[in-house]
Image (cartoon, rainbow, N blue to C red):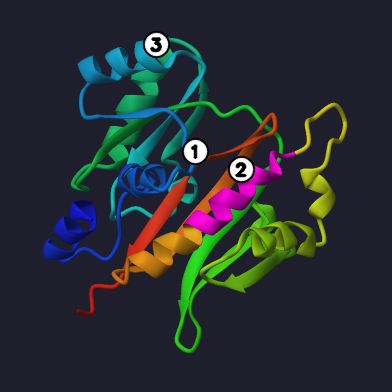
Amino acid sequence: MNLIQEALKQGRNALSEYESKKILAEYDIPVTREILVSDEKGLLEACRKIGYPLVLKACSFQIAHKSERGLIRTDIRNDEEALSAFGDISLKMKGVPGGVLVQEMAKGKRELVVGMTRDPQFGPCVMFGLGGIFTEILNDVTFRIAPLTRADALRMMRDIRGAKILDAVRGMEAVDEELLASILINVGRIGVENDAIKEVDINPLILVGSRPVAVDSLIVLDASD
């Protein structure tokens, strides 16, 4: 992929969130609607296209953990709030390449995590589990060696202790299992088909109704070659 090769030529070991989601979208993985901007004019145009409420994030291949650094603003509801958040994030990003991501606010209470890592012995492996803050707290995840079959993906969904989060509960719809299975399969494909990709991290993958949507993502590259 040109995006990956260009990043490797620049000596980079990661893609930005915006770039990472472009890769996901190429593999038919649903991602949030978003626009990368670099100035106030572009910001306001993007806000009108995406629509309020929305989220603003710092976006750079050099920044992996945005929330810990105060580089995410959520529930922005008007131009004034957008301009204020943009100014604050831009100030904190001074000297860092990249821009500000204007992103739709995915409305859903259930957060999942999907990832791909390369095991020295088994090669690309797909990970699935509870996402958001629960990823580190509960460590409720399961792994499979890629490539995955549909049966593998469906089994992964039921292997986690918190599998009931995927069911219809408290007025929320049951997950679209076929779509979630295709996401797991396609994350495995990313690893199988792209040797230069070392890791894929989608966290959170939010259930918007029944539909899983990648809200944040990081792709780590293997620059050793």
Residue 3, magenta (yes or no) = no
Quadrant into which the N terminus falls = bottom left
Q: Tell which of 161 and 137 is nearer to you.
A: 161
Q: Looking at the image, is mark 3 or mark 2 earlier in the sequence?
A: 3
| Dominant secondary structure (helix, strand or loop) of the stretch shown in magenta | helix
The residue that mark 2 highlights is: 179
- The quarter of the rendered structure image containing the C terminus is bottom left
Q: Residue at x 71, y 57 (%)?
A: 154
Give the distance between the C-alpha atoms of the residues marked 3 and 2, in whole angstroms: 37 Å
Residue 12 visible (yes or no): yes
> Residue 15 appears at what percent x and percent y?
30, 54
Q: Nearer the viewer, residue 33 or 187?
A: 187
Residue shown at 80% from the left, 54% from the top: 163
Q: Secondary structure under badge 3? A: helix
- Structural crowding at the residue carrying mark 1, measured as other residues with C-alpha within 10 Å and reported as few (<14), some (14–19) or many (≥20): some
* Of labels 3 and 2, the one closer to you: 2
Crowd around label 2: few <14 · some 14–19 · many ≥20 (10 Å): some
Q: Residue 159: image x %, image y %?
A: 77, 64
Dot 3 crowding, Cα within 10 Å, few <14, some 14–19, many 20+: few
Which residue in the protein does label 3 denote? 80
